[in-house]
Amino acid sequence: MNLLWLEKFGFLLDVSFALALGILLFSRVKEPRTLWLLRGYLFLVSLAWVVQRFTKLPITSKLVDALVLACSLSLAILWQGELRRLMELLGTGRLAVLLGNTQKEFQANTSTATQLSEAAGRLSQKRRGALIVLDMGSDLRPEDFLYSGIPIDATFSTELLLNLFASETPLHDGAVLIKGNRIISAGVILPLSRQSISRYGTRHLAALGITERFDRCICVVVSEETGTLSLANQGRLERPITSSRLLDLLKEFMSSSTGTVISKTPKDNNSKSNSLSYNLDETSSKIDPDLPQEKK
């Protein structure tokens, strides 16, 4: 009797852990195509478990196991970046980030968004190159960068950000890391994107690279030659945008539970200004140092 009870308890515990893991995976996956792949994979795993436990079909069981193994290898190749990030979080013990819990230190407010968009707009007008990383819950650490930069740890302000990106300062070439309402460090060197995008330069590839690896951070890029504003999030880049459009995106990101703010179609009240900015960028991109020169 006790053995039967222990067997049932173990079965319920096994199913409970599996359901909890499945719910965690589904809650962290936001992209529809990735969600479909995950559903199909979990269906195959469940089918293999049912065949092994409740049927006596050795050949079918071997075939299903081989199919699950092949799909596992395929997903490991497709999701190598996500799996690497998962192992990094488990290895460093950052379970709060893994569970998607945003700590209070990362909770930026509307004032931060306003000051950041204002600073980006002024940098754009003055055509000062800039790279700004806003950590919204990824808990970025020095080991996540190629070079962690110079510690600042100061309250964020428009004036301080403008001074950090002044052309005569030694920190203007790197990125500035912002967490919540504080500037953590400056002169940070970011990892470049693994995407083979030849039309982007180093700043944009760095913005794509950091947002590919960390889904709860965004990166603002200001072109040095044209003053074009860009926003990167989850390995995607929206450019060109205006400072008002940037403010809308920042507010949307802060209020969104998914953290996805990149969209191809701008809002109606900004579509005219974005179109004008796009035309200006089209005419001046040939001399933009952040973009590769066209071959004659």
Image: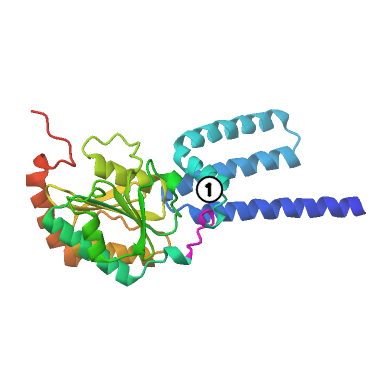
- Is residue 100 in the magenta section? yes
Residue 25, horizontal then vertical, whole percent: 54, 51
Q: Nearer the viewer, residue 109 or 16?
A: 109
Above or below for 234 versus 267: above
Residue 89, horizontal then vertical, whole percent: 53, 48
Q: Residues within 10 Å of mark 1 (few under 14, many from 20)?
A: some
Q: Number of callouts in the render?
A: 1
Residue 230, horizontal then vertical, whole percent: 23, 52
**Residue 138 in view in this figure:** yes
Q: Mark 1 — residue?
A: 89
- Is residue 90 in the magenta section? no
Q: Is residue 41 left or right of residue 133?
A: right
The N terminus - image quarter = bottom right
Q: Residue at x 63, y 33 (%)?
A: 64
**Residue 242 in view in this figure:** no
Q: Which residues are magenta?
A: 97-103
| Colouring chosen for the image of the structure | rainbow
Looking at the rendered structure, the secondary structure element under dot 1 is helix
The picture quadrant where one finds residue 112 is bottom left
Q: Is residue 107 left or right of residue 38?
A: left
Q: Nearer the viewer, residue 54 or 118?
A: 118
Q: Main structural element of the magenta stretch: helix, strand or loop? A: loop
The picture quadrant where one finds residue 289 is top left
Residue 69, horizontal then vertical, whole percent: 59, 32
Q: Nearer the viewer, residue 155 or 106?
A: 155
Q: Is residue 234 left or right of residue 143?
A: left
The C terminus - image quarter = top left
Q: Residue at x 57, y 56 (%)?
A: 23
The picture quadrant where one finds residue 254 is bottom left
Q: Residue at x 59, y 40 (%)?
A: 44
Q: Residue at x 76, y 51 (%)?
A: 11
Q: Amino acid at mark 1?
A: Leu
